[in-house]
Image: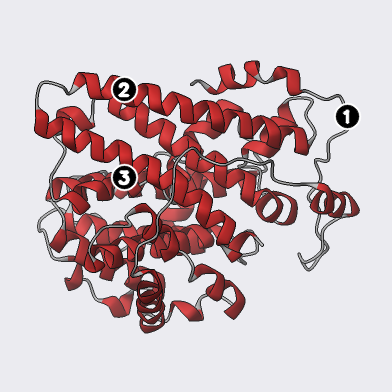
Amino acid sequence: MKLQKSITESMELKEDIANYHGHNKDSAGQDISDAGMTIMNSFTIPEFIPPYPVRVHSMEAETCKTIREWLLYHSVDKVFDPDKFTKLLHSPEFAARMFPDTSAERLELFSKFLIVTYVVDEIMDDTELERPWETTVSLALEIHKVITSTFPEIQSVTEILDTFSTDWRETIENLFPDEPYNVKDSHPNPCEIDAGKLSPIGSCFRDFWGAAVASMHRESCLRLARFYQKFLIASLIQIQNRENGVIPSLNEYVLIRRDAGASACSLIFVDFNDGVLIPEEIFSSPQMQTMMNIFRDILSWHNDLWSFKKECVVKGDVHNLVFLLSHYLPFSYQRAAQVVTEMLRAQCSELEAVAEELLKATTAVEEHRHTVCRYIEASRRCIGATHAWHNRSLLFK
């Protein structure tokens, strides 16, 4: 369903009351304004229960312990304060709910993907970094170096930088004048990249990527690489907007947020979990891409509800659907949250309708139909899993 259509159908929820648009902190960046405190005390997340049941993998607790040891090994605990590091450790609970029947080894790899992605996302969204642009670009290019060590054919760094305005592009280029981030002549194993030259998070990603390349279909890894690259670019665009004081339009927000969602790549792991690669002609079909876009919208908008207090009121980020609906339309924040909830329900129904169209388009080949069914089931489980995880996660408390 188009965003504008969802908004139009929700117009009866409008309320002509004053909106809070200030997210002011004191000079130390710790306290929020009186208006902000009013929002914090009065804002509640509307009731929303996805129509998808949730089961939990029996190895959830053991996997969480393994992931914690893995992060400690790479010194990721030194990147965050103890409280935030502890909160991040619950990320594998999401994996245990998306793939409740997979093997322990596959659950561990998917959990590593999720935790390193959430860690990257946490850095990208940190509005209190002393040098946000330099810090985040450095991390993004480290990850890009690891990815291009396997896939030199994907977009070069130069093409990525063309996404940004001239002054920002020059800033990035000046940070890395001599580093050959785009590998053109060889296909080294990611593990051949010296971990000692990477940050703790870059080292973590290198370790995960090496395991993924060794375990997954090359085409699945290439799809994951492209999705991850879009995630990095969208995250940098959000930072550029924050630095320049830009509030995106609703349509701009949808496109940026679709790619910037930390869980947007999750469906790629269906191929890995099943051991069967979905053919490119089906993966790239309009029905499949529409279904994946709806899926990513649901995950992003759901996260916007839960992260509104933390990211908008406290940190002042504007890349949130609750904030933007209230900014562009005469909604209070609470009414905007209700609109987002209605949009989520509508998108879940739309997901089912598009899934039916996708199944009809793949009836000719039973093997393809089976794989598509697995993607549909995984998207349902993921939506249920993200809701359960947000309810449990300390990141939003």
Give the colour scheme of this rendering.
secondary structure
- Circle 3 sits in a helix, a strand or a loop, which is it? helix
Asked if the residue at tag 3 contacts the one at tag 1, i.e. Cβ–Cβ closer than 8 Å, the answer is no
User: Which of disc 3 and disc 1 is earlier in sequence?
Assistant: 1
Q: Position of residue 174 (x, y in %)?
A: 43, 58
Q: Is residue 360 visible?
A: yes
Q: Position of residue 161 (x, y in %)?
A: 39, 45
Cα–Cα gap, marks 1 and 3: 41 Å
In the picture provided, is 20 more to the left or to the right than 299?
A: right
Vertical relation: 312 (above or below) 253: below
Question: Which amino acid type corresponds to the residue marked 2 in the rendered image?
Answer: Glu
Q: Where is residue 273 drawn, in percent x and y?
A: 21, 53
Alpha-carbon span between mark 2 and mark 1: 41 Å
In depth, the one of 183 and 222 nearer the eye is: 222
Q: Residue at position x 79%, y 25% from top? A: 330
Tag nearer the camera, 2 or 1 = 2
Q: Count residues near mark 3 (Cα–Cα under 10 Å), then give few for <14, some for 14-19, many for 20+.
A: many
Depth check, front residue: 34 or 394: 394
Residue at screen point 30% across, 23% down: 287
Is 142 located above or below residue 230 in the figure? below
Q: Nearer the viewer, residue 215 or 234?
A: 215
Whether residue 240 is visible:
no
Q: Relative to 55, does residue 329 appear above or below in the rendering?
A: above
Identify the residue under disc 1: 17
Q: Amino acid at mark 1?
A: Ile
Sequence order check, earlier mark of 2 and 1: 1
